[in-house]
Structures are given as structure tokens and as C-alpha cells.
Image (spheres, coloured by chain):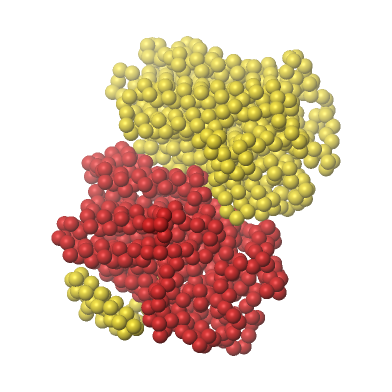
Chain colours: A red, B yellow
Amino acid sequence: MALYDGHWILTALVVLPLVGGAACLLVPEARAKTVALATTLVLFALSLPLFWTFDTAESGFQNLVSIPWIEAWGISYAVGVDGISILMILLTTFTMPLAVAGSFSHIRRRERAFYAMLLFLTTGMIGVFVALDLFLFYVFWEIMLIPMYFLIGVWGGERRIYSAVKFFLYTAAGSLLMLVAIVTLAWIFQDGSGAWSFAYDDLASLELGRRAQLWLFGGFALAFAIKVPLFPFHTWLPDAHVEAPTAGSVILAGVLLKMGVYGFLRFGLPLFPAAATDPAVVNAMLVLGLIGILYAAWVAAVQPDAKKLIAYTSVAHLGFVVLGVFGLTTQGIEGGILQMVNHGISTGTLFLLIGMLYERRHSRRIADFGGIAKVMPVFAFALVVVALSSVGLPGTNGFVGEFLILVGTFRTHPWIAAIATTGVIFAACYMLPMVQRVVFNRLDREENRTLTDVNRRERLILAPLLALILLIGVWPGPFLNRTRASVEALIEHVETRTASAPPVEAASVEPSSVEPVLIEAPSVEAASVEAAPIAAGSGATPAHISKSAVEAGEGE
Amino acid sequence: MSLGAVTGSGSLVATALGGQEGAGAGFQPVLPWLILALPLLGAAVNGAGAFLWRDDKRIPTIVGPAALLGSFAVVLLNFIAMSGAEPHGAAVVGLWNWIVSGDLRIGVDLQFDPLSMLMCMIVTGVGSLIHVYSVGYMRDDPGYSRYFSYLNLFVFFMLVLVLGASFPLMFVGWEGVGLCSYLLIGFWYENREYANAGKKAFIMNRIGDAGFLVAMFLIFTAFGTLDFIPVFEAAEGTLAYGGALVTGITLLLFLGCTGKSAQIPLHTWLPDAMAGPTPVSALIHAATMVTAGVYLIARTSVLFALSPVSQGVVAAVGAGTALFAASIAIRQYDIKKVLAYSTISQLGYMFLAVGVGAFTAGVFHLMTHAFFKALLFLGAGAVIHAVHHAWAHGEDGHGDARHGDPNDMRNHGGLRKYMPRTFVFMWVATLAIAGVPPLAGFFSKDEIIWYSGVYGTPILWGVALATAVLTAVYMARLMVMTFHGRNRTFGHGGVAEAGRRLHEVPAVMWAPLALLAVLSVVGGWANIPEALPLLPTVEWLHHWLEPVFAPAIAVKEAHGFAPEYRAPAGGGEALWAGVSAAIAIAAVVGTVRALSPKPVPTEAESEAPTGFARVLHDKWYVDELYDRAIVRPSLALWRACWRIVDAGLIDGAVNGAGRAARLLGWAGGQLQTGRVTTYLVAFMLGALLVLGVLS
């Protein structure tokens, strides 16, 4: 274990893809994919011990590294991992080799640049998940945008330019406001303490007024809501998915869509607890999540294009995740994090499968298929298993996530959770007809008779994904228990800080002079609060939370 | 999977039901995990076989039935062990922790109690016979290995459903059997209608499942746990009698039951489900899966006992469905459709029973129905098999297309001559379901009719009696059309050809029928009513299940449940048992005598029925109603969401904003040289510049 004491590992995960990407640009065209696959496989291997050595009892950051970078502005290179990011990092490193291998026969032009883009994107994604300095976070957040823009715009389908620009404008618009909010936060900190800082712990310790929190939360929330994507900011997603090459879609679904919810968990809730638990905000987020679940499922059900259908299902799945996060219960948030992993696996696999079909048939129109199970039995088996995961059948990973989200959200917002539960009906309404029209029915099109089943490389890609779908379905323990300590600390932090936030005040921006309190600081009073809303069941109304939290506040 | 991997609640937790401390101490489950592991292993081996040794039928022939017979042997061992331990408590075996989050803990825990053991006996016992029968029925099917994989997997999930010690684990089985049902209804997926039927079954079941899920959320919110035993023990203290919460929980659970057990209003998937292979109809859509709703209410009897409103709804829906479905069965020509509506009707009886609080009667009928309805379906399968082979034999293999539908009874007739064994077994089952003593259905159905009057209302009692008459009529009609009269398989003039081509099914198929016929006779003797003490097994099943239902009965008694054992029209149980037996015999004899002399037109000759007969033949137009009132408006709404809201409103706004930012677009256009290296260089330079300036 001495070798793997972890301090260098996160940095290695960030830097390695950058080096690999540069190497891709330098080697001959034909070798680029080999270099890319090797890089991502090494990356995955490097990240695995992170999972084994993760201390499940520790709620704070592990493998923490903080090096001053731009000292004058208080910007540092600070990275670390906790229960909220650990699964996201592994999801990224797990997805990348599959995305690379899935592109081997699909990408035939500008291979060097393509694989370099994939690897640069990886750096951005891992960077977002490990960054503990808000400036650093923003840099990675923006770095991510550019390779994705090119992946869609250069290697995409017919309407790639429109889709790429739409993707870029949507996300750039959101991030600009976030930058303003980040700088404002740092300025508030400077105003209170006399020194600039972008460090996560420093900014999380700020005691902001409710109104300031609402404004700043809004700045972050738009960026995150677009990334999630939350209704009605979702229309970039279907276009981006349809036009992106398979690897782009896999990464979009597998990792990029997690950024928004991750942002809410990492920044939105802890930095602005009063805003994030404000009844108006919570209800708005829950209702938008709920609309996403139902509306996106409906729209998905009438799509003629298989890829677009799956793109819309992403909106529905992420709607569930948002529900879990803003329900603010242990089950809801743990389920939400697990569901992000599940969605990455199942939707990523669905895009891979549709990509395999497209490579053979050059069509994604559902109506062009039918009876494929006759000629591609292994493909049909995989599609059915993944579709069942996507609709949340018990025994697959999808059920564990959805169940936890719904059972958790039901405790605080029973009606919304109950309505969201009808999403399981609509999931069957969009997924089963698609599966039927692709793999079942009569094989009545001449072109489809000659399709060949998935080859050895494709089986090697699908096997680990299908295995994970079943493994998480029957034994989610190892994944859930890594999120536990951090999630419980997060809820505790949000609840204590909501109570300690000053009541509505006149001054819009009023930094507190109170000694910053680290979020990990354990306190007996707070610990008692943490259990309260859980035990209280549906009675845990906002009034109840604030009451117990007020008691905790008095204790301090 | 082994007991070595046990975590959480301890390796072997024996807990008594209903607060009888230590009552179950005498019973230790024997190899409990093996009951589940064998069918799962069978599914895996046969599933692999579907890809690896597609044309070799030896392995599935051995593995498929053997997995079931092995599981049945272990169940039998446990059943005997439990019979020896008095009184029969509940033993919970923990295998591993499934979902743990915060204060929620869901374990993979199996509950062994009299109810789950009885269900296991039915599932693995009847299941074994149907697996053996399938060896003959599916012999020529190219998907033979895949078939056994699905069938084994179904039994695995069905056993999870009945053995699960918590609501979520039961739900795993609940949706798992739904999945297998979906796969097996659409087994011949190349037929679009069959595939549609599977999809319809899955989606309609999901409507019910959503109710089940919300019920679980309510239970967890109220009790803080989802395990059966703690929930039921705390039920009376936690939930107010007749309160909104318990009524909500039980009605939502019952919504799940209407989906799984095909009750009004979610019944329409079951007749379509007849698209699956006939042994599947026997196992899944008659004997086991569709009874899961009855099992759920029996399992949660304490909760239902706390809500008189829910009990009333269950009884009313059950009675209504029983009569409604029986009325449709009278006018169907497809032999499997008759049996499908008969199943819906008989399930209605079971819900009527558990709805009025006669839980034992409901489970009793569940058991006897599993015997005689499985027999009826397998017998129908034998008929279909024989007709199909007669048509296909010696021809180009497309006999069905030329002759018609082998399921259509108008293409049968006079089969007693060619299939004497099947003929006898089918009559045994018919008399059993019609309620002719001393066959199984007489005892179980009579008990339901009796309690629907004693515990329920005169209306329920009247409906139950009327349904009994209809049952006898449609079953007798089925027998007359199929086995009596002149054969019509090759047209009215083709009797000679029929003699050459129609044959009895092989022993591997009729032997299971024989065993089921025996069970259809003696199955009812498991619970002889006290009023007719003809055998020493008086109220045996009632005593066996007593530990499970005692808490529910206690709740009802504590709230004024004190029935007077008199029928609504006066008279005791023995009298009314005699009356209903007489009614059943009269209806069967009357129908046979009325229909036998009438010539039956063949499928090709017959004209569409008119008037009320047509309404019944067309199933009261429920499918059409759902299509017009729900399916089509939904699709229209969904298309509007896509075309108008998404593509119109939202994207319109986005594109408008995009045009406003035309300058940005123009600037971008200037940079779009189409050379990736230019972009890359610009990107890297820009990034370095920004970082450099900041440092």
C-alpha cells in the first residue's frame, strides 16, 4: 500500500490522458487508437486501487493534495476524492476504454485528432470530479467543453454543425454565470477575511445571507441544470446525441451528464445550503425533475430514431437523480449517486449497441429493423438485458437506484415521489416497443438478413458492462457503502447550516465574520440532527427540519 | 451463494409469527438456498445452451426438468420437516444484504412458513409436471433450449416471490415473473401479434407494479422497515383500524394484484397472453404467476384485515371479475381463450374469498385451481398439438394456414375417439372446476361461495352462485365442442382423413396429465369442511395455515367480526354444499344435452354472432375502449409534446436566441477552417495564454 498512498494518484489520473492525447497526435495515424486504448486501460488500472483503498468511514476528502498555484489570487491546485466523487471518477475511467474500443471500426478519418480529443476530454472530466479549488474546477469544466464540441462538430452526423453550436452555446451560456458566481464568492471571502481564496473548504465555510445564497445558487444552478439536463434546458441533448459519434454519445451519457448533478452535490448544496433547501427552490427542482421523468419518457416513446429515443430516456433518468438529490434524504442522495453510475452503464451500453447496429446497417431508424434476433442473437440478448436495466427491473442495477431515490424522496415529498413512480410505467412504454421493433417481429427486410452478429471485440466491450448491470443489481453494497459517510455528512452540513443561516436580511451580500467552520467538523448536536428527519418519516416537513436544526444551532 | 456468506440479521433467524415467541424453534430449513439455486442454474445452463449447442436437445431435456424436480425434492424435505415441528412457525434465513442505505436495510432473506411452503409445493410440484410435459410439446421447436431457460428462470423468480421475507424481495420475484411471462408470451417473437401480446402484458403489469411500489414507500415511511415479520407485528399498533393510511397501502397493493392476477380493470392482457406456448399458459397464466396477487393479499392479510374498505373493494372486484369473465368465456371459440377467461373468473373467486376474510378458502382454491386448470391447459395443449400435427403431417408444413386455427374449437369435435386418455383427463378437470363432488373444485369453490355469503353480503353470494352456473356451462360447452360430436378438423366430410392423422399425444405428455388428474380429484380433500366430515383431513389446510392467518382473524374479531354461520337465504353449510353440487351437476348435464345434438359449423362456415352474444364474443369491447380512451389520446399527447413543445416552443426560443447571437456565429464561421489541427493549436495556445496571464 505504500506505493499507493494516493497522493500522486489523482494528479496522475488528470495528467496521464493529457500525455496520452499528445502522444496520439505524434504517432502515425494507424497507431493512434492503440495508444489511446493503452492509455485508457492504464488509466482504469490506476484508478482501481482508489476504489479498494477508499476509507468508507471517512466523510471528508481523501488523497488530498493542495499546492499553491496563483498565490496572489488564492488559487491553488487542490484535488481530493470523497464518497460523492469516487464513483464518478471510476465511472469515467471505466467508460473511457470502452468508448475508445467502441470507436475502432467507426472512426476512419482524422484518427489521431479524434483519439487526442477523447483523451483531452478525459482530463477535463476527471479534473472536474477531483478539483477542490473552484477556479481549478472552472478551468476543467471549460476544458471539457471544447473537445466535446469538436467531437460532435467534426466526426458527427449530417447536422453536426448545428448540434455542436447548440451544445456549445447552451453550455457556455450556463458556465459564464457560474464564473461570475465563483468570482463573487471569492470576493466575499476576501471581503471577510482579507485574503483571496478559491479553495473549496474556505468558500464552503462562508456564512452567507439567504438572499446572497439564492443569487449565487442561481448562478451555479443554471450551469448545472443545463448540464443535467433539466427540463426545459434539455433540447441540446437529443441533437448532440444523435449527431455525435458513438464514443461521443457514450461519454455524453456516461460521464458528461453526471456533471450537473455532481455540481449540485459538490457545490450547490454545501455552498448555499439555505438556498438549496429553500422550499421554493426545492419544489422548483423537484417539479422540473418530475416533468423530466414524465415528459421525456413521453417524447421518447414517439421517437422514430433509436438514438434520439435513448437520448430522451437520459433526460428521464436524470430527472430521477435530481429528485433524489433535492429530496435531501440519505436514501435519495445515495440512490441518486448510484443511479448516475447505473445510467452511465446502461445508457452508455445502449449507445454502444445502437452504434454497432449503425455501423452494420447505416441506419438508426427503428422502422428499418425488425427480427434482428434471428441474425444477431448475442446482440439481441445484450439489448434486452440493457433495456431491462434501463426500465429498472429488479435484479438489475437500475432498480436499486430508482428504488432508493423514490423511497427517499417519498419521505420528504410523498406526492412528487408517488407521481414520479408512474415513470416506471412510461419507461416500459418507450423501451419495450423499441426493443420489439428492432430485435423481435419478423425479419422482413432483405438488407437485414446479412447482418453479422457482434464480433469478438464488441463482445469484450459488452461483457463487463452486462456483468456490472447484474452485479450492482444484486450486490450494490460495495458501491453504496463508499458513498455513505460523505452523503450523511453532506445532509448534516446542509441541515445545520440552513438553521444557522441568518434570517432574511436587508443587505444583499453580507459576509459573516464568524470563524469559518469546516464541514467535516463533527459535533454531537449535529449528529443527532442527522438522524432526526430519517426517523421522522413523512413527518419530516421543512418545519421539522428547521426546528431540530435550530436546536443544533443553539447547541453551538 | 451459501450460508457462509451470511451477514446482517445473523445466519439463521427463527422468528415466530403473531408474537408466539419461539414457536418456530423446532423447524430448521434444510438447504434453503438450493431451492432457488437449482432453477437458476438450470436457466443459466439452458440459456448458455441457446447460444452454444443450439441443435442439441439432450442437455435441455435433462437439465430443464431436473432442475425443477431437484428443487421440488428439497421443498418436499422442508415441507415434511415443517409438518413435524409443532406449531409451524416462521423461519427466516438471511443470505446477504441487498440494499443498505441509511436506516433502510433490505436483505436477501427467505421466509419459511406454512404459506410459503404450500406455495413452494405448488410451484415446484405442478412446475415439474409442466416441465416434463414441455419436453414433448416443444420437441420440434428450434428455440427448445431458450424455452427451458425462460421456464427455469420463471420458476426461480416465482420462488423468490413466495419465499422473499420482505416486500422488496417479493417485488423482485413479482417483476421477475413478469419478465419471464413477457419473454414467454412473445416466445415466437417473429409473429408481431405475439410480440405485441408480451409487451402488453408487461406494460399492464407495470401499472400495477407502480401501485405496489408506492405501497412499499408508504409502508417504509410508516414502519421504518420493509421486512414482513416486523411490519405485521407492528401493524395493529401503527396503523389505525380503518384509517386512510392502511386503506391507501392495501388499495395500492391491490392495484398490483389486479395487474398480476388480471382482475378488472387490468385483466385484458391475460387473454392475449395465450399467444405463448400452451405449457406456459398452464404454468404461468393459470397455476402460478397469476395467483401471485392472491398470495400477496394472503401474505399481507393483517394489513387488509385492518381496512374494511379495502376488503370490500377486493371482494367486489373479485366477484365482479368472476362473473364478467365467465360471461365472456361462454362465447369464445378459441379453446385457450375460454380457459384464459375461466382463469380470470376463478382468480376472481379467490379475490372474493380473501376479500371477505376467508383467507384459507382463497389459498385453498388457489391450490386446487392450480391442479385442474394446469390440467385443462395441458389437455388443451395436447388437443392443439394433435390438430397441428394432423394438419402439418405429410404436407408442406404450412397446414395451419390452409386449414385454420388449431386453437379454434370449431376445428375440433369428436376427439374422444382419437385422444381417449386426454378426453378422460379433461373431463376430470372439467368436473373438478365445475364443482362436482367429490372432486377438488367442489370443496374449494363451495367454501368460497359459502363464506361469501356468511362473511360477505347476499349480493356477493348471489354473484358467486351465478358464476358457478356459468363455469359449469362454459366448461361443458368446451368439452362438447372439442371432444364430442363429429370431427371437423378436416371439414365435415374429412372424418376418414382425421382417423388417419389424429393421434393421442405421447406418454411424456399424457403422463403429467394423469398425475394432475389424480390431484384434481384428491386435491380438495386437503380441507374437508367440518359440516361434511367424510375423511380424517377435516380442516387440515385451515389448521396448517392457521399461524399465518391468525393475526388477521384476531384483528377482525377485535373489531366486531362475529359471523353467524347461516347462508343469506337460510340453511347451513351442508345444505348449501348439496345445493351448489346439484346446481353444478345440473348445469353440466343440461349443457351437454342441449349442445350435443346441435351441429357445429366449422371455422370457415360460421357467421359472426349477433346481438348480446356478439358483445360477449367481443369481450365487452374493453380493449377497444382502452384503445380509444387511453392509448390513442396518450400517443397524441406524446407526439404533441415532441412536435409542439420540444421542437416548437423550446427549440424555437433557443434558435431565436441563436439568431440574435448571429455575430458570434459569424465570428465562429470565420474560424471554421475545417482543419482539426488548426482548432487544436488554437485551443492549446488559448489555454496556455489564459493560464500564463493569470500566473
Instruction: Residue at 45%, 45% (x, y): give it.
Output: A471
Q: Is residue A431 above or below residue B48?
A: below
Whole-percent x, y for residue A6 in the image: 41, 61
Q: Is residue A252 above or below residue B236?
A: below
Whole-percent x, y for residue B688 in the image: 28, 78
Whole-percent x, y for residue A422 in the image: 54, 54
Whole-percent x, y for residue B490 in the image: 39, 19
> Seen in the image, is A523 located left or right of residue A476?
right
> Seen in the image, is B231 located left or right of residue A6?
right
- Report if residue B336 is visible in the image: no
Instruction: Residue at 57%, 57% (x, y): give it.
Output: A331
Instruction: Residue at 22%, 80% (x, y): give it.
Output: B670
- Dividing the image into 4 quarters, which one contains the C terminus of chain A? bottom right
Kindly give the residue lying farthest to the front in the view shown.
Answer: A2
Kindly give the residue lying farthest to the left in the view shown.
Answer: A28
Near-viewer residue (B660 or A343)? A343
